[in-house]
Image (tube, coloured by chain):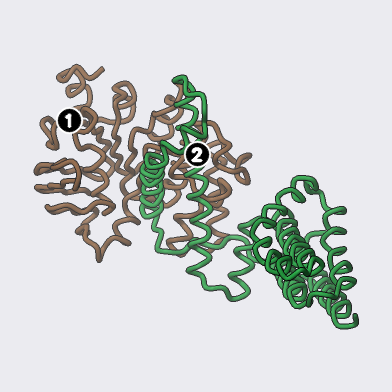
Chain colours: A green, B brown
């Protein structure tokens, strides 16, 4: 079953909005809301452990807010903040594993996000790839000449990395210009909203809504 | 087809690179640009579709190359860059090959049919839905070439097209280029490839064309083998 990326995006945003509207103290509601992404994680063909670990990256940031609650002596509230932010990130990560970033960007565009921002994001993805490739090439070259610590190489060569990446990015841009690029990438595959998408959206929104406002 | 007079250009950080280049090329003529690294060959070629804009006059297919005419000029001039990897930037080979046509306003279905037809002729049809980064060097080169040839330019410029290619790949590329009827300008250090694909050559030195003649004559004169 493959849903239209727009449907997935709307459901995700609705879920996140609902999650963020839960006030501290509504622990049962939060626990039930957590079940949704956990269920999705269990049934999806994704690397579960990896996603659970990646979602934990948000904890140091949300700890800043949780710390305020802790300082006030409200441990339950601190745990609530941490859990809510963790589960939010986990939901986003699951979606990014199930739908490609390119499809998500196209869905955003079809839902009205400014085209300019979408194109910038697409290029950012392309250029991040360039940056990574250049970093890998430099690391390999340094290792071949006996450098032992790749982290040291990375930090000392950061300036050079950006110069090389800029050069490659310019080449890519030139190649695009030479083939008539005028500021926006052509769209090849039109998205198709099926009855299944309408059904999934309805079931998802009603289920989350009922859960949120009945407890 | 191409007329260039007194073209001068200098990079901000490295001084003059072109010092008054005069050049003419007829329709369907194939010309090799030879010369040492840094002699100005690529800089010169980048002026022909307006990527670089120096002093002097350039005309391609009767259109003067200037900011207002770039769109029309780029329809006439196809440029295959030295690094095929930099030229392929879309998620699949098919999307990348179609890119130029779609920019010209060709309908998606029509562009797709033409792209698939060309990919078949280049024996790349099996890779249409593959990520271009996962192709071999020769396949990348052919995919990059396909993206440009599909636009049916009147002039095809290739910058060091044999880089990273093995001998069979070079022979295949030469055969492919010889099938193309448009004017061709090939920047190369590979004398054998130049002989196989061009009839005329110009020799660049320190930002100037210092010799112009048959490819064989120029290669022998400068001992460029």
Query: Residue B146, how many percent across, how many down?
Result: 47, 43
Residue that sits furthest to the bottom in the current view: A213
Q: Where residue B203 is drawn, which disc sits there?
A: 1
Does residue A27 appear in the picture of this structure?
yes
Q: Would residue A124 be found to the left or right of residue A18 on screen?
A: left
Measured along the vertical axis of the image, is residue B222 above or below residue B205?
A: above
The residue pinned by badge 2 equals: A133
Mark 2 on the same chain as mark 1: no
Which is more toward the observer, B62 or B130?
A: B130
Residue at (48%, 50%) from the top-left corner?
A: A127
Measured along the vertical axis of the image, is residue B150 above or below residue A104?
A: above
Residue at (87%, 54%) from the top-left corner?
A: A43
Which is more toward the observer, A120 or A176?
A: A120
Q: Residues within 10 Å of mark 2 (few under 14, many from 20)?
A: few
Q: Is mark 1 on a helix, strand or loop?
A: strand
Which is more toward the observer, A183 or B47?
A: A183
Mark 2–mark 1 Cα distance, whole angstroms, equals 35 Å
Query: Residue A160, how many percent across, how many down?
Result: 37, 39
Q: Would residue B87 be found to the left or right of residue A47 on screen?
A: left
Give the mark toward the camera: 2 or 1: 2
Q: How crowded is mark 1: few (under 14 residues within 10 Å), some or many (20 or more)?
A: many
Image quadrant where residue A70 sits:
bottom right
Q: Where residue A177 is drawn, which disc sits there?
A: none
Residue at (82%, 67%) from the top-left corner?
A: A76
Query: Residue B114, how many percent across, how many down?
Result: 53, 52
Which is more toward the observer, A73 or B93?
A: A73
Quadrant containing the C terminus of chain B is top left
Residue at (32%, 54%) from the top-left corner?
A: B76
Q: Would residue B116 be found to the left or right of residue B160 on screen?
A: right
Chain to which the residue tagged by mark 1 belongs = B
Query: Residue A19, how many percent across, how many down?
Result: 77, 72
């Amino acid at each position: 079953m493959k849903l239209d990326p727009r449907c997935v995006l709307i459901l995700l945003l609705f879920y996140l909005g609902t999650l963020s509207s839960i006030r501290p103290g509504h622990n049962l509601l939060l626990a039930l809301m957590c079940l949704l992404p956990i269920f999705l994680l269990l049934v999806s063909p994704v690397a579960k452990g990896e996603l659970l670990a990646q979602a934990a990256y948000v904890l140091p940031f949300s700890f800043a807010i949780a710390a305020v609650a802790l300082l006030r002596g409200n441990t339950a509230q601190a745990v609530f903040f941490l859990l809510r932010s963790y589960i939010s990130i986990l939901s986003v990560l699951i979606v990014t594993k199930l739908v490609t970033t390119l499809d998500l960007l196209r869905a955003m565009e079809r839902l009205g996000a400014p085209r300019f921002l979408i194109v910038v994001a697409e290029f950012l993805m392309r250029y991040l790839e360039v940056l990574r490739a250049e970093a890998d090439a430099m690391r390999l070259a340094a290792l071949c000449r006996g450098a032992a610590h790749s982290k040291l190489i990375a930090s000392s060569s950061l300036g050079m990395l950006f110069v090389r990446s800029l050069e490659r990015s310019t080449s890519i841009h030139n190649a695009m210009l030479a083939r008539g690029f005028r500021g926006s990438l052509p769209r090849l595959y039109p998205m198709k909203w099926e009855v299944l998408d309408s059904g999934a959206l309805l079931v998802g929104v009603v289920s989350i809504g009922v859960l949120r406002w009945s407890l | 087809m191409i007329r260039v007079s007194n073209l001068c250009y200098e990079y901000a950080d490295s001084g003059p690179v072109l010092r008054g280049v005069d050049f003419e090329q007829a329709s369907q003529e194939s010309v090799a640009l030879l010369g040492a690294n840094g002699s100005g060959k690529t800089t010169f070629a980048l002026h022909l579709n307006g990527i670089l804009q120096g002093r002097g006059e350039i005309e391609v297919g009767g259109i003067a190359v200037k900011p207002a005419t770039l769109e029309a000029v780029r329809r006439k001039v196809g440029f295959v860059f030295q690094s095929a990897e930099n030229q392929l930037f879309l998620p699949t080979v098919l999307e990348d090959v179609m890119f130029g046509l779609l920019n010209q306003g060709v309908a998606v279905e029509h562009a797709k049919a033409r792209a698939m037809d060309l990919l078949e002729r280049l024996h790349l049809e099996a890779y249409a839905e593959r990520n271009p980064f996962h192709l071999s060097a020769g396949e990348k080169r052919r995919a990059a070439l396909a993206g440009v040839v599909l636009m049916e330019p009147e002039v095809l410029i290739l910058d060091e097209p044999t880089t990273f290619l093995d001998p069979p790949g070079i022979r295949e590329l030469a055969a492919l280029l010889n099938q193309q009827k448009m004017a061709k300008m090939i920047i190369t250090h590979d004398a054998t490839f130049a002989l196989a694909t061009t009839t005329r050559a110009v020799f660049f030195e320190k930002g100037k064309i210092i010799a112009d003649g048959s490819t064989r004559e120029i290669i022998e004169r400068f001992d460029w083998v």
